[in-house]
C-alpha cells in the first residue's frame, strides 16, 4: 500500500480510539435491514484490527456498544448485537493469535448476558499472551458512568481513611478508570461525519487529536485507518504548551509560573 510507505515512523500514534458509526445508514442506503449494516461493520472491525497489527500499533480501542445503545435501542437489535459480538469472537480469536493481538474490554461488562461474558473471557484468556496490538472493546461503556465508578471507588478510599479529600489528584482518578493500564488515545477517529463524542473516553481524550470521516463504518478499511494516521502525523500537538516553531523544546512541557 503506497500510503503505508508515506507514514512517518517518528510520528505514529501509540493509541488510536474509534467511534464506529453509520452501520444503520449504510444498510438503509441499500434498502437493507440495520442488522446487515452491523454484520458488515463486524467485517470492518477485523480489517482494521489486522492493519493495526501490521503497523505495530500498540493500542486500538473500539466503541462497540454503549450504555445508551443498550437502553435506547429495540431489544431485538441489542440481542442481535450481542450475538454478533459472540460470533465475532468465536470466529476471529485464531486470527487474533496469528496476528499477535490481545483482546480486553472496558465498560460495565458485568451487566452483559452471561453467555456473552463467558465468550469474552474465553477470548481474552486465549489471546492474553500476545504481545502485539491490544484490542480493547468498549462494551456497555459510557464515559460518565466510568467516572461515577471511579468517584465511588475514591469515596470508599476516603471512607476507609486511606486518602484525604484534599489529597485527591488526577492520578488518583486515573487509577480508578477502566483504562488505568492504558495510555490516553493520541488519535480519535469517528466515522459517518457526526461531530460528536457520544460519551466516549471523555477524561482520556483531553489532548487527543480528532479525525472525522464521512465514510460509514461498514465501508471503513485498513487503508482508511492509515489515512487518518497520516493526517495525525501532520498535526502540531501542543498539549496546552507551545509548538516547536513557537517555543522549541518547550513544546509539550508544563510551564510552571515563577
Ligand atoms: C453504530 O451504527 C454502531 C454501533 C451500534 C456499534 C458498532 C458495532 C459494530 C461495528 C458491530 C460489530 C462489533 C463487533 C465488535 C463485532 P448505528 O447503528 O448507530 O448507525 P446509524 O447511526 O447509521 O444508525
Image (cartoon, rainbow, N blue to C red):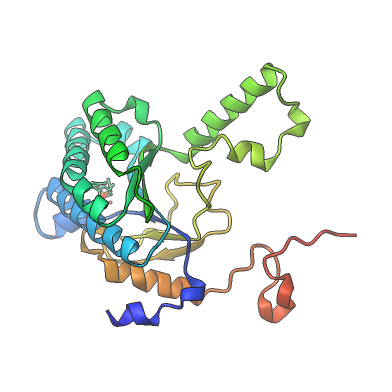
Specify the quadrant that holds the C terminus: bottom right
Residue at the limit of the structure toward the left, as seen here: 31
- The one of 35 and 149 positioned closer to us in this rendering: 149
Looking at the image, residue 128 sits to the left or right of residue 75; the answer is right
Nearer-the-camera pick, 22 or 129: 129
Is 166 left or right of 189, judged from the image as shown?
right
* Residue 112, image x, y percentages: 30, 28
Residue extending farthest to the right is: 258
Residue under the point 62% across and 20% down: 156
Query: At 38% across and 64% down in the image, what residue appears?
Result: 56
- Please provide percent x and percent y for residue 11: 50, 73
Taking the view exactly as shown, the residue that stands out farthest to the front is: 129
Number of marks present in the image shown: 0
Pick the front one: 8 or 38: 8
Residue 130 position (above or below residue 240): above
Residue 145 percent location from the top left of the image: 48, 33
Q: Position of residue 106 (x, y in %)?
A: 41, 39
**Quadrant of the rendering where the N terminus is positioned:** bottom left
Q: Is residue 147 above or below residue 39?
A: above
Task: Give residue 7's quadrant in the image.
Answer: bottom left
| Residue at horizontal 65 percent and vertical 36 percent from the top | 172
Q: From the viewer's perspective, tell me whether residue 56 is left or right of residue 24.
A: right
Amino acid at each position: 500500500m503506497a500510503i503505508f510507505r508515506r507514514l512517518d515512523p517518528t510520528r505514529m500514534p501509540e493509541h488510536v480510539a474509534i467511534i464506529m458509526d453509520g452501520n444503520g445508514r449504510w444498510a438503509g442506503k441499500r434498502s437493507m435491514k440495520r442488522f446487515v449494516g452491523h454484520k458488515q461493520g463486524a467485517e470492518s472491525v477485523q480489517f482494521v484490527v489486522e492493519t493495526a497489527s501490521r503497523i505495530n500499533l500498540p493500542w486500538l480501542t473500539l466503541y462497540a456498544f454503549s450504555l445508551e445503545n443498550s437502553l435506547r435501542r429495540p431489544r431485538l437489535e441489542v440481542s442481535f448485537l450481542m450475538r454478533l459480538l459472540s460470533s465475532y469472537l468465536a470466529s476471529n480469536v485464531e486470527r487474533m493469535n496469528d496476528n499477535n493481538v490481545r483482546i480486553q474490554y472496558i465498560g460495565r461488562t458485568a451487566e452483559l448476558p452471561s453467555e456473552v461474558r463467558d465468550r469474552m473471557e474465553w477470548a481474552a484468556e486465549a489471546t492474553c499472551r500476545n504481545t502485539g496490538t491490544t484490542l480493547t472493546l468498549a462494551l456497555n461503556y459510557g464515559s460518565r458512568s466510568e467516572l461515577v465508578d471511579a468517584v465511588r471507588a475514591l469515596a470508599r478510599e476516603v471512607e476507609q481513611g486511606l486518602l484525604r479529600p484534599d489529597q485527591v489528584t488526577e492520578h488518583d482518578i486515573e487509577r480508578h478508570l477502566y483504562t488505568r493500564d492504558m495510555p490516553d488515545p493520541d488519535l480519535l477517529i469517528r466515522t459517518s461525519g457526526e461531530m460528536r463524542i457520544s460519551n466516549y473516553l471523555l477524561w482520556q481524550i483531553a489532548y487527543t487529536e480528532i479525525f472525522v470521516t464521512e465514510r460509514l463504518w461498514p465501508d471503513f478499511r485498513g487503508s482508511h485507518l492509515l489515512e487518518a494516521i497520516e493526517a495525525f502525523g501532520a498535526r502540531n500537538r501542543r498539549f496546552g504548551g507551545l509548538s516547536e516553531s513557537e517555543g522549541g523544546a518547550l513544546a509539550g512541557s508544563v510551564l510552571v509560573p515563577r
